[in-house]
Image (cartoon, rainbow, N blue to C red):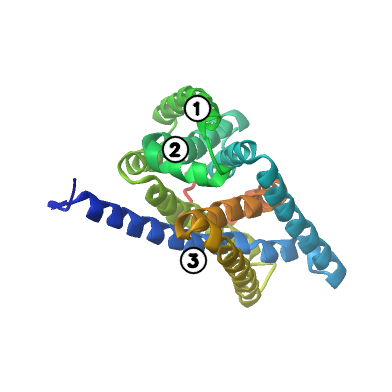
Amino acid sequence: MAIYQGVIVTPMEDDHMMDMMTVIALLAVVIIGLPHGAMDGAVAISMGYGQSIWRMASFLAIYIGIAIMVVGVWLWLPPYSLFAFLLLSIWHFGRGDSLSYLPPLPRYIQTISHGGLVVLGISQCDKPMADQVFQWLVFGDTAMLWVWIDVATWIWIPVAAIYICLGLMDNRLYGRIAEWLVLAVMVYTLPALVAFAVYFCLIHTIRHMYRVMMMLRHMLAPRMAVGLTMLFTLASWAGGALVYMALLPSQGAMPASMMVVFIGLAALTVPHSLLIDSLFRPRFEYDAQEQNTSHNPIEGRHV
């Protein structure tokens, strides 16, 4: 039995409630979170790929080609691919949460601390749910995967401890440390998929979209940026729906949903991370920081 808001529910009701929470979490990831990656079309145009049809077609071919390659490697080596995706997610989430004006070493520590909390913390704090999802994603046993996750967690813990110590000594980190502690409580108390959805939709997505819009506002008309984002979003939804319908008869609703959402996220995250973390952000983040509004509570600013 479990207790929700003072009401005792039976195991069957508990399972139903968890199923509903899982469905809502997945829908939030797809409907709210996915469009932040769909801004990559607008980002590409701002970087000059829209100067001709050939350049834009080349960008799309490379982007889609990388995504297809990720799916192919995943089907060939599922456990290795999932662990690589988790490591990439640590870097991508953490880099998005890090403060660009920090020196390189403190920023690396902040990156690993924030990204590790989201990826490793969620996995470790709700192992039953995480393991069920991982089994669906690797199509079987996850014993070796958990060995790798445990090793990564033991590496992450001292880095996070150093980060907390740095935060106590550097007032520039107070805002992010407070955010990290709130996230830690959320990760510990919420079911894994719910915690991930809250972070992905309300922190990572909003922060990323705000930053990108600030960077693009002098390079691309807002209407074009929004239109491209919607176009890429609808294309992603349509592709995901087709794959889901193909998997549904053989896998069932929940496994098919997990495969489409998370293997799909992996396929899109690799080209997205290459574009944003390797090309776009290093080129524009300094200017964006200078133009940033000092009152934005999500972005944070050195004062």
Q: Nearer the viewer, residue 127 or 116?
A: 127
Q: Earlier in the sequence, mark 1 or mark 3?
A: 3
| Residue bearing the label numbered 3 | 31
**Can residue 262 be seen in this snapshot?**
yes
Q: Secondary structure at mark 1?
A: helix
The residue mark sitting in front, 3 or 2, is 2
Please provide percent x and percent y for residue 47.
Answer: 75, 60
| Residue bearing the label numbered 2 | 123
Residue at 72 percent of width and 64 percent of height: 46
What is the C-alpha distance between the residues marked 2 and 1? 13 Å
Q: Earlier in the sequence, mark 2 or mark 1?
A: 2
What is the C-alpha distance between the residues marked 3 and 2? 23 Å
Please provide percent x and percent y for residue 137.
Answer: 55, 46
Q: Secondary structure at mark 3?
A: helix
**Can residue 298 be seen in this snapshot?**
no
Asked whether the beta carbons under mark 2 and mark 1 sit within 8 Å of each other, the answer is no
What is the C-alpha distance between the residues marked 1 and 3? 31 Å
Q: Is residue 253 above or below residue 195?
A: below
| Residue bearing the label numbered 1 | 156
Q: Earlier in the sequence, mark 3 or mark 2?
A: 3
| Neighbourhood count class around disc 1 (C-alpha, 10 Å): few under 14, some 14–19, many 20 upward | many
**Image quadrant assignment for residue 48:** bottom right
Report whether 22 appears left or right of 205: left
Q: Is residue 155 above or below residue 263?
A: above
Q: Which amino acid type is shown beneath numbered disc 3?
A: Ile
Q: Which amino acid type is shown beneath numbered disc 2?
A: Ser
